[in-house]
Amino acid sequence: MKNLIFLFLMLVPIFCLSQMKTGTFSDWEIQQQKKAKPTIVHIYTDWCAVCKIESFQLNKDKELVEMINKNFYLINFEAEKTKEKIIFQGKEFNYLPNGNSGIHELALALSKNKNQPVYPLWIILDKNQNLVYYHEGQFKPEKMKEKLSEVLAL
């Protein structure tokens, strides 16, 4: 019985979290042609502990999740595991293998640090695909809501 209660208490937070709707770059291109919206590109890696903590914190904020789902396209982009060719803003980007690992050219192109991007990395584009905000490192929910509100006011 104790195990059942413990399992229930562990699973409850999962059901209480809202989920941000995410898409891929190819979905995004199609969606942008139908209805142009500002875009958030979230660049992360699986091994990044800060990325995992941040994701949990952001998804926990229902107001933020609702704001993003309603007004933005969100692309979660795993910089070191995404291997397919991506066409972004008319340019082609590929995966660059390096032994057992590698990195996608698009992550390098979007990063200010061309040798090794800082994770997590957030790129916010207006509906015309112009860069309006760049953020390296953890993005706190309140700060993100503030920045996204500014983008919507443009």
Image (cartoon, grey):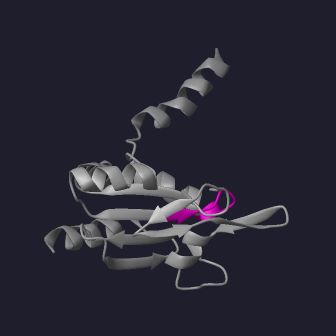
Which residue reaches farthest top? Answer: 1
**Residue 141 makes an appearance in the image:** no
User: Where's the C terminus, which quadrant?
Assistant: bottom left
Magenta region includes residue 47: yes
Please report the residue visible at 47 percent of the width from the left and 37 percent of the height from the top: 13
Q: Nearer the viewer, residue 136 or 142?
A: 136
Magenta region includes residue 45: yes
Across and down, in percent, residue 141 comes to: 37, 63
**Residue 57 makes an appearance in the image:** yes
User: Where's the N terminus, which quadrant?
Assistant: top right
Please report the residue visible at 62 percent of the width from the left and 65 percent of the height from the top: 94
Q: Nearer the viewer, residue 11 or 28?
A: 28
> Looking at the rendering, which quadrant does residue 41 occupy?
bottom left
Q: Nearer the viewer, residue 142 or 2?
A: 142
Across and down, in percent, residue 109 comes to: 53, 78
Q: Is residue 91 above or below residue 8?
A: below
Looking at the rendered structure, the number of numbered marks drawn on it comes to 0
> Looking at the rendering, which quadrant does residue 114 occupy?
bottom right
- Magenta span of residues: 42-50
- The answer to whether residue 116 is left or right of residue 53 is right
- The answer to whether residue 44 is left or right of residue 13 is right
- The answer to whether residue 106 is left or right of residue 101 is left
Please report the residue visible at 39 percent of the width from the left and 69 percent of the height from the top: 89
